[in-house]
Image (cartoon, rainbow, N blue to C red):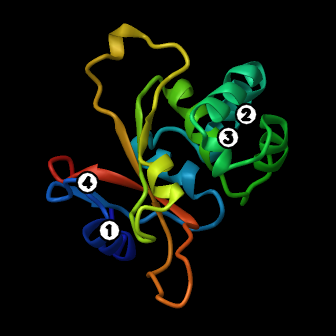
């Protein structure tokens, strides 16, 4: 794996995450970067397989994911309905977000830790997106699995405008790297 240098700089400069043993790794920025991120953790699964399983999960449990977004105030970040989200991500190259992360937690039966750098000085995104996503139902046999850590990334910050994420990268432990 190659280190994602811009993400590494964001992690080091704008995150409280203990990053001395964590490294962000490069994934393609083709609109499917969230699925590519999870492919680093599960290389045997294809991007299309992640997409299909995510869409199935969202469609079968629409009400659950609607309530997750509303209850956690995540609608301030992503105001798409589950149906709108599914219709968009069914195509390649479409950005993913909160609903996809939440559904992937259930698909993979793993906690997912979302890391959002504090580039904009404690803005609402930072407060809302630094959180863990948990599976809809939890299989006790996986209780000792370490959470999957992903980072919202993007361009180098620029003082002239508010920083906005446009990419995801996986965070790997240097013990595994």
Q: Earlier in the sequence, mark 3 or mark 4?
A: 4
Tag 3–tag 1 contact (CB < 8 Å): no
Check contact, mark 3 vs mark 2: CB within 8 A.
yes
| Distance (Cα) linking label 3 and label 1 | 30 Å
User: Callout 4: few (<14), some (14-19), or many (20+) C-alpha neighbours within 10 Å?
Assistant: some
Residue in view at x 52 percent, y 75 percent: 163
User: Quadrant location of residue 101?
Assistant: top right
- Label 2 vs 4, first from the N-terminus: 4
Q: Nearer the viewer, mark 3 or mark 4?
A: 4
- Quadrant of the drawing holding the N terminus: bottom left
**Label 2 vs label 4: CA separation?**
31 Å
| Disc sitting over residue 55 in the figure | 2
81 vs 21, nearest the viewer: 81
SS at mark 3 in the image = helix
Depth check: give the residue in front, 176 or 44.
176
Quick check: marks 2 and 4 in contact, CB under 8 Å? Answer: no
Disc 2, SS: helix
Q: Which residue is mark 3?
A: 51
């Amino acid at each position: 794996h190659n280190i994602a240098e811009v993400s590494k700089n964001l992690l080091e400069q704008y995150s409280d995450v203990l990053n001395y043993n964590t490294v962000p790794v490069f994934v393609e920025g083709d609109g499917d970067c969230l699925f590519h991120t999870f492919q680093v953790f599960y290389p045997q699964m294809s991007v299309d397989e992640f997409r299909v399983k995510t869409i199935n999960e969202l469609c079968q449990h629409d009400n659950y994911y609607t309530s997750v977004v509303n209850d956690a105030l995540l609608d301030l970040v992503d105001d798409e309905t589950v149906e709108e989200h599914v219709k968009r991500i069914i195509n390649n190259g479409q950005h993913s977000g909160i609903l996809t992360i939440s559904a992937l937690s259930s698909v993979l039966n793993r906690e997912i830790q979302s890391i959002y750098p504090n580039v904009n000085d404690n803005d609402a995104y930072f407060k809302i997106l630094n959180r863990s996503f948990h599976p809809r139902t939890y299989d006790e046999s996986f209780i000792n699995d370490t959470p999957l850590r992903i980072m919202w990334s993007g361009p180098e910050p620029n003082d002239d405008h508010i920083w906005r994420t446009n990419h995801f990268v996986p965070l790997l432990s240097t013990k595994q790297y």
